Amino acid sequence: MLPGMTDQNDRPSLGRRSALASILAAGASVGAARVARAAEETPVSAMTSHHDEPSNSHQEPGNHPGVASQPVVRTQSDYLYRPTIHFSPQTGFMNDPNGLIFDGQTYHLYYQYDPFAPYAGQVHWGHATSTDLYTWQDQPIAIDQTAAGEAYSGCVVLDRDNVSGLFPAQKAGGPSETHAQGPITATQAAIDALKPSLGKTSSDVPLSPENMDALGPSNSAPFGHVFDPPTTNDLPPVTPPTPTLPPMAGGLVALYTRATPQKQTQYLAWSPDGGKRFIDYEHNPVLDIGLNSFRDPKVFWHEPSGKWVMVVVKSRAHKVAFYGSIDLKHWMHLSDFGPAGLFGVDYECPNLIELPVEEEGKSTRWVLFVSVNPGAPQGGSVTQYFVGDFDGERFIPENTVIGLTDFAKDSYAMQVYENLPASEALYFAWFGNWQYCEEVPNRSWRGLMTVPRTLSLRRDDMNWLRLVQRPKGLEQLRGEPIPFKVGRIGAQSGVQVSIPTGQAIELSLTVTVDERKNPQPDGNKGRAGRFLIVFSNGQGESLSIGFDAFSAQLWLDRGDLHGFSQPFFTERFSTPLTANSRRFSMKIVLDACALEIFVNDGLSVGTALVFPSSPLDTLSLQATNAGATVENLSLYPLRKTMDRPTAM
């Protein structure tokens, strides 16, 4: 039996485990044939080398010689557009969230990260920790780029019982016999034996760049220190986390993609210190099917079938593959899903999760999320989802309908948290779009995350099951409410209030537009009346969210902001709401360059980057040719949680 395996009721029986182990062993023995078959089934374009970069549909300027050494000059934009409650890196370029897990006390946020330049490339796993999902502490880089490739997206799971066998066996009455950097290796044992004569210590385990000392002798090390490349000198200081995992046989295990121009394979790594850093399994890769567009594993424990399930994409082939394992090392192919949904170029960052259906008791459905880049209806990157069932081997959609997580275009590569209490569904997404993320006006840092959002399903007015997304935890950030009492707004009129600059705000309201007896076209005022929410400043810039009562549609217009312009930076978006209804509710979060809109209790969500050339300091509510009733209005400033230099 594997270390940590038991025959307890909450684990599969020994017979089932033995059977699956035998199948996995048989699968491993025909791995070469499987690689050949995968190559035959995959389009030639998916096997084409991308010269000096891994295969994906976005370029990586950070990999080009000299980019990391170019000085980055901070400008006012770096402060004006830095959010106060959304996570962003101190420097460098950040995109997809990775390895989201709650260890019982601490939320871990890993992310795709180039620490050397504000461009994609040289991909490492950045890391931050929090106890409230808003106040984040920067941690050392958790997984480095190595000679084996860049550290692309992946996940972290809690191997509580050490079924992987990666963690050193615990000695009775004391901690395991390990070196500070992990298990004692032969090389380390030799170094330790020579330590007295050398007068110094060393380790054969690579360190993250920011953990290396600067070159040069000192009183404590007369022979000098580990070489530190100059490009890491400006990396921010880090606060080492205090391990929060309770005593257990295992710990945190990462599964992620190593990417080179020739190949993308799945790697396994374990953490000796509760997630601060990960040590690669010595027999990596654990999954290699011979493709160079095979990435982004998301792994979860499937209790009914008693195994770990990996969801991973054959990116250029537009397929989601499912694999099973009992030890996280040996993986057996279960099934494929797709091609399905949007055409696009690359499928990326899959997630599969069971979600509750609101107002239907204990009813649940499985939801498969697949990010697509490029290929979004609005252009660039987008995340689509399918509602269906998963039996431990296959995902079967209920119908041919697909949904999009967002009606704007700046939410991508979402990932759900592992190990949350009561199986809560919670996620972060990257707040950006590959069409312009490396050209936005802030230069010393690029990339941010959405606010944390919960997930569920709800039937809409047409009886379709739709995704529901709600922001989590904003209540704890609220300051004193901004006085703004509004009940009725007459036709052709409006009200306004000053809002603080350099601080995030939260606006909530419910609006019912009056019925217009003669709903004929009336210029740009709408046939049945329009209601507008406008953020503006004295320089003539405006950001507007509006509702058209005749068509029951919502729009977002960022085209009258003048801080950024680019051909793919789409200015206007829209989405249908409840048909034939003149009523809607809305929650808006505005935080520097980040705008998030949650309509009708999260049934429609818009995520958009906004770049005014000057801060927006006025909020207006306006009605056109029909009056409106405003209810449940609240307006709060949100206290700053991120330790970053901002305009505040």
Image (spheres, rainbow, N blue to C red):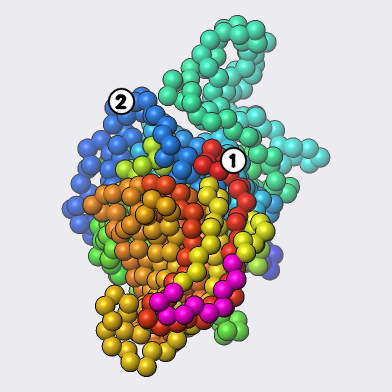
Name the residue located 31 percent from the left edge and 64 percent from the top edge: 572
Name the residue located 60 percent from the left edge and 48 percent from the top edge: 640
Residue 492 lies in the magenta-colored region: yes
* Residue 17 in view: no
Residue 421 versus residue 253: which sits nearer the camera? 421
Q: Earlier in the sequence, mark 2 or mark 1?
A: 2
Q: Position of residue 116 (x, y in %)?
A: 41, 31
Please state, as top left, top right, bottom left or bottom right, where the C terminus lies in the image. top right
- For the residues labelled 2 and 1, the Cα–Cα distance comes to 30 Å
Q: Amino acid at mark 1?
A: Asp
Q: Secondary structure at mark 2?
A: loop
Q: Amino acid at mark 2?
A: Gly
In the image, which residues are magenta?
484-493
Residue 427 versus residue 319: which sits nearer the camera? 427
Q: Residues within 10 Å of mark 2 (few under 14, many from 20)?
A: few
Q: Secondary structure at mark 1?
A: loop
Q: Position of residue 337 (x, y in %)?
A: 34, 68
Q: Which residue is mark 1?
A: 643
